[in-house]
Image: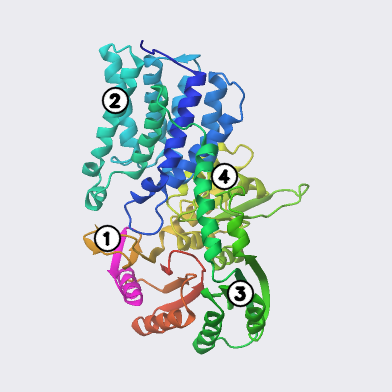
């Protein structure tokens, strides 16, 4: 017997099954990210987007079609993270805008909904690219329209045929995007969409599929707990010990090595990180007291944190920590009159955040690569800033769409997104703010300031690949510029200097190097000396950014 319609209960169950299948396969989707940097997060972003909608939907009791559509649309819009998550939320929004008007969905309605879904998603992207999730979504609508015109009435046949065709479109994405073909992968966003659709189809066809994320995670949690129990039993050092030394003595390379030798004699997982002229220390030990006493010889200690790793592992069945970027709150007095202008910056690393605060940022959203803030995070930040006009600096190309979406959802303030793609662009943009200028003049000034900056970022490769005609091996260092990879090699300093050489021109006045959390003082001081020797007429500045993933972020102006 054929099924010709989908009611609200079936739609909700299909959505849940799709969400579960996407969540289950998120790691695989992450691995499809083309760039071989340690920031593959498409699967994570799409999953967290869909989970926001999943939670909103499953808080309802026996919802009708209108409530179901509203929940999954609103939840995905506010929970959207990264470009892939925002596009997914717009696909859902477009679909539900049509579906919400009906009690049941047949082939005609589903086809109309798919048409609106694709149109809505394309409209949300300033410069749509083929070979992406948009292409796969278009394939869904194209085949649906073809089947509708053919007179197909069996919904099972319709859905199976549409999804099978979309799978074929996904396999063709490398032909549309050379970077995918060169890397030998399909588009990660398109793969995420197909995982969602396959989960929904399996439920519709009556297959035994998971529709409850909690139970799915519970099974994983049992495995994790068994593993962590074993790990706890094998732990050699029981206490994770962390603190910051507020230095009152010189701390040079020899002092650092002496401290490191002492820590390694009493534990492992030793990490000594220079931060804003102080020192952050992390290690695992059985005697945190001795570690702390030794550190006191260098200065005053703050942010001391000692955790029992054995107990921490034993308690792994506690609630999962939310994967939401932390936010530095600024709580204006409720009765204060709003000021004219406010500023929100996305940043990662203590040093970077302090720089933004020092030049006027009212609110810092912690995030960036691997931890893209959601539309909801940006909305919360907008609410905290007591100003009539709020400027947002996303500082990452994968956050701009979420910022735009938050802007469009804000009604009580004017929100202006300056589309900064890097932290140096954001810093330059904010510096170009003029207090006595209009919103329009400041928008133009700050956008121009951002565009005058060249950015380079040094990180490492997580897999072998070939991009921009450069052969890259796992663990190679890479210098990535605004438009592609500028340098590759096994020596970090050489890669950094080669990258900068590609960025510098006759108009360059300043080179600013933002130092990451994994770089030692002796290394960045040597780099500064080398650069000053290479570019005698250019000012070279070093700033402690404290950012993860990227050893150096370089600004050339």
Task: Give me the C-alpha separation between circle 2 and circle 1.
Answer: 36 Å
On residue 163, the disc is none
Earlier along the polypeptide chain: callout 3 or callout 2? 2
Is residue 500 found inside the magenta-colored segment of the image? yes
Give the residue pinned by disc 2: 142
Judging from the image, what secondary structure is the residue with disc 3 in? loop
Neighbour tally class for label 4: few under 14, some 14-19, many 20 plus, Cα within 10 Å = many
Judging from the image, what secondary structure is the residue with disc 2 in? helix
Q: Residue at x 49, y 49 (%)?
A: 223
Measured as percent of width and height from the top left, residue 370 is found at 46, 54
Quadrant housing residue 244? bottom right
Task: Give me the C-alpha separation between circle 3 and circle 2.
Answer: 63 Å
Q: Residue at x 45, y 26 (%)?
A: 14
In the rendered image, the vertical position of residue 243 relative to residue 375, given as above or below: below
Task: Give me the C-alpha separation between circle 4 and circle 2.
Answer: 36 Å
On residue 415, the disc is 4
In the rendered image, the vertical position of residue 355 relative to residue 442, given as above or below: below
Give the residue pinned by disc 3: 286
Measured as percent of width and height from the top left, residue 208 is found at 42, 28
Asked whether 155 or 240 is in front, the reply is 240
Which of pointers 3 and 2 indicates the residue nearer the eye?
3
Q: How is the image coloured?
A: rainbow
Q: State the extent of the magenta-drawn residues as a range.
A: 483-503
Earlier along the polypeptide chain: callout 4 or callout 2? 2
For the C terminus, the quadrant is bottom left
Measured as percent of width and height from the top left, residue 535 is found at 36, 80
């Amino acid at each position: 017997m054929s099924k010709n319609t989908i009611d609200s209960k079936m739609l909700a169950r299909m959505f849940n099954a799709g969400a579960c299948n996407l969540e289950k396969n998120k790691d695989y989707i992450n691995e499809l990210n083309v760039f071989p940097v340690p920031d593959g997060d498409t699967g994570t972003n799409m999953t967290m987007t869909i989970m926001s909608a999943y939670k909103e939907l499953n808080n309802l009791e026996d919802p009708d079609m209108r409530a179901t559509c509203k929940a999954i649309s609103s939840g995905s819009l506010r929970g959207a993270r990264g470009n892939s998550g925002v596009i997914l939320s717009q696909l859902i929004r477009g679909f539900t805008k049509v579906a919400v008007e009906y009690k049941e969905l047949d082939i005609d309605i589903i086809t109309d909904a798919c048409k609106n879904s694709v149109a809505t998603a394309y409209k949300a992207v300033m410069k749509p690219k083929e070979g992406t999730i948009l292409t796969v979504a278009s394939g869904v609508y194209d085949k649906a329209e073809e089947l509708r015109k053919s007179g197909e009435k069996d919904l099972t046949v319709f859905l199976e045929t549409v999804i099978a065709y979309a799978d074929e479109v996904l396999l063709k994405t490398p032909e549309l995007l050379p970077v995918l073909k060169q890397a030998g992968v399909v588009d990660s966003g398109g793969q995420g969409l197909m995982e969602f659709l396959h989960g929904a189809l399996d439920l519709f066809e009556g297959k035994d599929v998971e529709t409850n994320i909690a139970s799915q995670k519970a099974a994983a949690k049992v495995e994790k707990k068994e593993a962590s129990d074993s790990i706890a039993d094998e732990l050699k050092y029981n206490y994770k010990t962390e603190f910051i030394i507020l230095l009152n003595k010189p701390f040079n390379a020899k002092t650092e090595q002496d401290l490191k030798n002492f820590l390694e004699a009493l534990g492992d997982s030793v990490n000594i990180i220079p931060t804003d002229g102080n020192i952050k220390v992390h290690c695992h030990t059985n005697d945190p007291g001795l570690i702390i006493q030794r550190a006191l010889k260098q200065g005053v200690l703050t942010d001391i944190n000692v955790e029992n790793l054995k107990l921490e592992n034993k308690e792994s069945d506690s609630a999962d920590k939310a994967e939401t970027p932390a936010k530095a709150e600024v709580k204006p007095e409720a009765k204060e009159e709003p000021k004219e202008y406010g500023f929100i910056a996305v940043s990662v690393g203590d040093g970077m955040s302090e720089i933004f605060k020092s030049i006027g940022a009212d609110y810092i959203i912690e995030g960036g690569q691997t931890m893209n803030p959601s539309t909801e995070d940006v909305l919360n930040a907008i609410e905290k800033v007591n100003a009539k006009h709020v400027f947002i600096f996303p500082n990452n190309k994968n956050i701009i769409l979420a910022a735009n979406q938050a802007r469009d959802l804000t009604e009580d303030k004017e929100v202006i997104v300056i589309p900064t793609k890097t932290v140096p662009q954001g810093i330059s943009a904010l510096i170009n703010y003029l207090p006595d200028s209009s919103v329009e003049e400041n928008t133009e000034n700050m956008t121009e300031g951002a565009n005058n900056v060249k950015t380079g970022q040094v990180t490492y490769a997580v897999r072998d690949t070939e991009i921009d005609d450069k052969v890259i091996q796992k663990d190679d260092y890479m210098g990535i510029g605004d438009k592609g990879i500028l340098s590759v090699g096994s020596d970090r300093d050489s890669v950094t200097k080669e990258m900068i050489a590609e960025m510098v021109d006759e108009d360059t006045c300043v080179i600013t190097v933002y130092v990451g959390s994994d770089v030692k003082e002796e290394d960045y001081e040597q780099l500064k000396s080398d650069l000053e020797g290479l570019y005698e007429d250019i000012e070279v500045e070093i700033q402690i950014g404290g950012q993860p993933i990227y050893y150096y972020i370089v600004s050339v102006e």
